[in-house]
Image (tube, grey):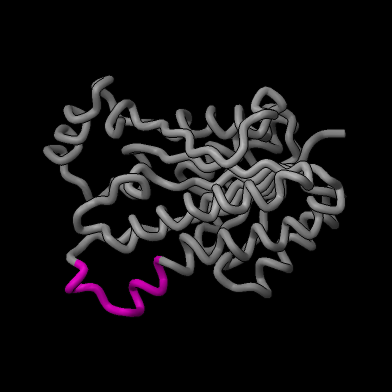
Amino acid sequence: MNKVALVTGGSRGIGRQVAIQLAREGYRVLINYNKSKSEAQDTCQLLRSEGCQVEIFKADVSKQDQVKAMFEFCIDRFGHIDVLVNNSGISYEGLLTDMEEEDWDRIMDINLKSVFLCSKEVLAYMVSNHHGNIINISSMWGQVGASCEVAYSASKAGMIGFTKALAKEVGPSGIRVNAIAPGVIMTDMMKDFGQADIDYLRDETPIMRLGQPEDIANLVSFLASDRADFITGQVLASNGGFVI
């Protein structure tokens, strides 16, 4: 029986590449999106044309009722779920003193509350099966913090603490929980950066290149596989040496 993976924020960037890679490896994949319907449909069509089993589902992962409906849809379509990739995330760049409360709340809702809601929902299925794998996409800024990205850094640091604590809690139930802390990855989040900024970030990366979504998808694929069966509660960095 093919494994089933659900990828939140799977219509663009890292999430899209994760969904593509897992589907091509034989997983049945549910791609979650909220606003990027056309991108989700395009990805679904691409993978189905290759013979992959893929579905899409619209849900705001910061809303409990929508998260519950998404997992019910997944179980209805595929019968079970083996892997949850908590990838949904948004960023905010600016001084903390200029940040509004609603901006802070939105960052925390999308980046951190969603991880709680989705993990809680998926555990209802995984615990009873004594099997499962949760992979949280954090950030190197969750490890060391970034100036002018205080809320983002705090939300990603929260994901890391969440990962370590939950791994201890559900390990006896046969469930592994890990986090990935990407470095600078060339996705839509980089669209507002000028070439000079991109060049600077590249020069600050010891291997002298910036990351691609494939770099993170490769790591997700490894953590989701039996090759990583003795790895849980860990934060795996894929940052080209930017943070050591």
Question: Residue drawn 68% across and 62% down?
Answer: 120
Q: Which residues are magenta?
A: 96-107
Using the image, determine if residue 81 lies above or below residue 119.
above
Question: Residue drawn 52% across and 44% down?
Answer: 15
Residue 205 relative to residue 16: left or right: left
> Which residue reaches farthest left?
196
Residue 193 relative to residue 37: left or right: left
Residue 97 relative to residue 91: left or right: left
Marker count (numbered): 0
Where is residue 11 drawn, in percent x and y? 54, 49
Magenta highlight: main SS: helix
In this rendered view, identify the residue nearer to me: 113 or 171.
Answer: 171
> Which residue reaches farthest bottom?
101
Where is residue 129 drawn, in percent x and y? 86, 47
Can you say which quadrant of the picture contains the C terminus?
Answer: top left
- Based on the picture, tell me whether residue 103 belongs to the magenta stretch: yes
Question: Residue drawn 82% across and 55% down?
Answer: 75
Question: Residue drawn 68% across and 34% down?
Answer: 23
In this rendered view, identify the residue nearer to me: 81 or 227.
Answer: 227
Using the image, determine if residue 83 lies above or below residue 210.
below
- Based on the picture, tell me whether residue 154 belongs to the magenta stretch: no
